[in-house]
Image: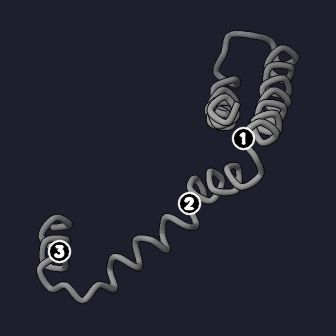
Amino acid sequence: MYRIGIDLIIASFVVWVAVPIAPFLPFSAAVKATIVATVIAAAEVMFWLGVLLAGKEAARKLKAYWNPKHWRINRQRLDQTNDVKQKEERLEESQ
């Protein structure tokens, strides 16, 4: 059940890819709006069903992992290392 819940949570984020693609589909505006509304509703249902199956803690960890705000903090922590060799390698890679 835990694995199914995690899969549903991940799939709910993947389904959101359809929202920015919908305006470029060859349908009328009403059909595009229906597609977007259906995708959003399906993503929410999948996410909350996944939370029920996997547990609240697993959902919190996944949301934190995918939050871009946390990505930058981790990168800043890497930049604050005392290892001179790592800093030099990172500097060379960025050039």
Q: Residue furthest bottom?
A: 82
Which quadrant is home to the C terminus?
Answer: bottom left
Task: Read off the residue under disc 3.
Answer: 91
In the displayed structure, does residue 90 sit left or right of residue 11?
Answer: left
Q: Secondary structure at mark 1?
A: helix
Task: Read off the residue under disc 2.
Answer: 68
- Label 2 neighbourhood size at 10 Å, few (<14), some (14-19), many (20+)? few
30 relative to 48, above or below: above
- Label 1 neighbourhood size at 10 Å, few (<14), some (14-19), many (20+)? many
**Disc 2/disc 3 C-alpha distance (Å):** 23 Å
In the displayed structure, does residue 25 sit left or right of residue 76?
Answer: right
In the displayed structure, does residue 17 sit left or right of residue 76?
Answer: right
Task: Check whether the beta carbons of the residues at disc 2 and disc 1 lie within 8 A of each other.
Answer: no
Q: Tell me what residue is drawn at x 64 percent, y 37 percent.
A: 6
- Seen from the viewer's position, the closer of residues 60 and 69 is 60
Q: Earlier in the sequence, mark 2 or mark 1?
A: 1
Task: Read off the residue under disc 1.
Answer: 54
- Label 3 neighbourhood size at 10 Å, few (<14), some (14-19), many (20+)? few
Query: Quadrant location of residue 65?
Result: bottom right
Query: Can you give x and y, in whole percent of width and height, for residue 30 in the image?
Result: 88, 17
Q: Secondary structure at mark 3?
A: helix
Which quadrant is home to the N terminus?
Answer: top right
Query: Can you give x and y, in whole percent of width and height, for residue 74 in the image?
Result: 45, 71
The amino acid type of the residue labelled 2 equals Pro
**Disc 2/disc 1 C-alpha distance (Å):** 23 Å
36 relative to 31, above or below: below
The amino acid type of the residue labelled 1 equals Ala
The amino acid type of the residue labelled 3 equals Leu
